[in-house]
Amino acid sequence: MTAINIFNKRHYAKRDHPDSHTFYCGRRMRDLAGSPLANPFKITKSLNRRSVLYLYERHFNKIVNGDDVATLLRREFMQALADIILVYEQGIDVDLLCWCTPDANGNSVPCHCDMIRDYVLKVTTL
């Protein structure tokens, strides 16, 4: 059965997942291009994980529904989702990479990639 997995970029080794297709879904880093699917809301002293995930969910839904978002942002975001959907519908496992989960203690934590995975599973025919 085809799967969509979520991994922490810091600990991910492609050699351990040779049969899957990898999509980085995080923000721009020094030597790493950011993804249109990245969560633009950062955890800070005033915004906890729950808050930034709530904000991302609103952001995600606005883009997917075409509500009041810049055309270029929507096009890049939807193309990134379409790329994931295409690979998944071909029966290839998908690995979504970000910096959230698992956390430093090895615990699974909620992540914006959960929303991406849930959306792909909802709209695909597999």
Image (tube, grey):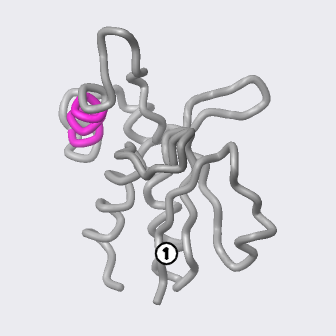
Whether residue 56 appears in magenta in the rendering, the answer is yes
Residue 32, image x, y percentages: 73, 34
Dominant SS of magenta comes to: helix
Left/right placement of residue 8 relative to residue 18 reads left
- Looking at the image, residue 104 lies above or below residue 27: below
Q: How many marks?
A: 1
Q: Nearer the viewer, residue 118 or 87?
A: 118
Is 59 on the left or on the right of 95, as rendered? Answer: left
- Farthest residue, direction front: 105
* Quadrant assignment, res 46: top left
**Residue 30 is one of the magenta-drawn residues:** no
Q: Three-letter amino acid code at disc 1?
A: Tyr
Which residue does the image show at 57% across and 80% down from the upper left?
92
Residue to which mark 1 is pinned: 88
Q: Secondary structure at mark 1?
A: helix
Q: Quadrant of the C terminus?
A: bottom left
Residue 80 vs 57, above or below: the answer is below
The answer to whether 2 is drawn above or below residue 60 in the figure is: below
The percent coordinates of residue 37 (x first, y second) are: 46, 41
Q: Position of residue 24 (x, y in %)?
A: 60, 48
Asked if residue 100 is positioned above or below residue 114 in the image, the reply reads above
The residue that appears at 53% across and 83% down in the rendered structure is 90
**Along the viewing direction, whichever of 82 and 27 lies nearer the viewer:** 27
Q: Residue furthest top?
A: 46
**Residue shown at 45% from the left, 68% from the top:** 85
Residue in view at x 53 percent, y 43 percent: 105
Query: What residue range appears in magenta?
Result: 53-61
